[in-house]
Amino acid sequence: MGTIAAVSRSGEYTFTKPNQDSITLLAGLGVEGDVHRGVTVKHRSRVKRDPTQPNLRQVHLMHAELHDELNASGFRVAPGQLGENVTTRGVDLLGLPTGTRLHLGPRAVVEVTGLRNPCPQIEAFQEGLLKEVVGRDEHGNIVRKAGIMSIVLVGGEIRPGDGIRVELPAEPHTPLVPV
């Protein structure tokens, strides 16, 4: 069981998202009032390629433990500053399989669709940060640490302090890949 550390949204295409007292998740759409809300893709690079693609990136979740790690390395990162909608604590987001359902707060449910593929805007935010959130493991495989993406199955209001319950999909589990 984890907790929601912060919730954020932005109605404009901005890299950072201001923290809110609460946000409302809308089934099949995403975060009410957020620029990435919708049935089809809203991220500008993806819209340019094919605006009819389904939006598998309705809600971006990031673990506060990444903020802790980055801050310990000399960066200054707070919830929402890397574009996430939900900052979590106590859940190994990157270790979850595709299809995991996260029960957020009293009612909302999101389904994990994949990893966030960090973009060059992270480097523009703070020099050197991109290499901290994208690296390689001991086998040379790319490791992306900038959170996960999800779709909203059941809507509801969520706020900092709300609990997170993890519901794993049936096995065999499929590892997360960028979406």
Image (spheres, rainbow, N blue to C red):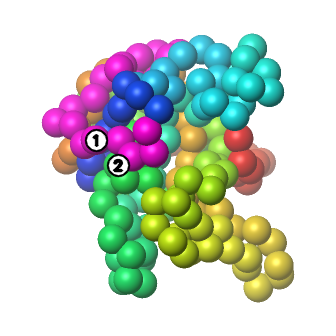
| Residue 124 visible, this orientation | yes
Name the spot of residue 95 as percent of width and height, x first.
Answer: 60, 60
Q: Few, some or many C-alpha atoms within 10 Å of disc 2 (few <14, some 14-19, many ≥20)?
A: many
Residue tagged by mark 1? 18
Q: Are marks 2 and 1 in contact (CB under 8 Å)?
A: yes
Please provide the residue range marked out in magenta: 14-33
Quarter of the figure with residue 169: top right
| Left or right: 41, with 93 as reference point | right
Front in this rendered view, residue 166 or 51: 51
In this rendering, would 157 be left or right of 17? left
| Secondary element at tag 2 | loop
The front one of 124 and 151 is 124
The residue located at (70%, 41%) in the rendering is: 179
85, above or below 62, in the image: above
Q: Residues within 10 Å of mark 1 (few under 14, many from 20)?
A: some
> Residue at the spot x=74%, y=50% of the render?
177
Q: Position of residue 92 (x, y in %)?
A: 49, 61
Residue 24 belongs to magenta span: yes
Mark before the other along the chain sequence, 2 or 1: 1
Task: Give the amino acid type for the residue marked by disc 2 in the picture.
Answer: Gly
Pinpoint residue 23: horizontal percent, then vertical percent: 28, 29
User: Which residue shows up at 36% across the image and 19% down it?
Assistant: 32
- The residue that appears at 35% across and 41% down in the rendered structure is 17
Side of 110 relative to 2 (left or right): right
| Mark-to-mark CA distance, 2 and 1 | 6 Å
Quadrant in which residue 41 is drawn: top right
Horizontal side of residue 130 vs 155, given as left or right? right
Task: Name the chief secondary structure element in magenta.
Answer: loop
- Mark on residue 80? 2
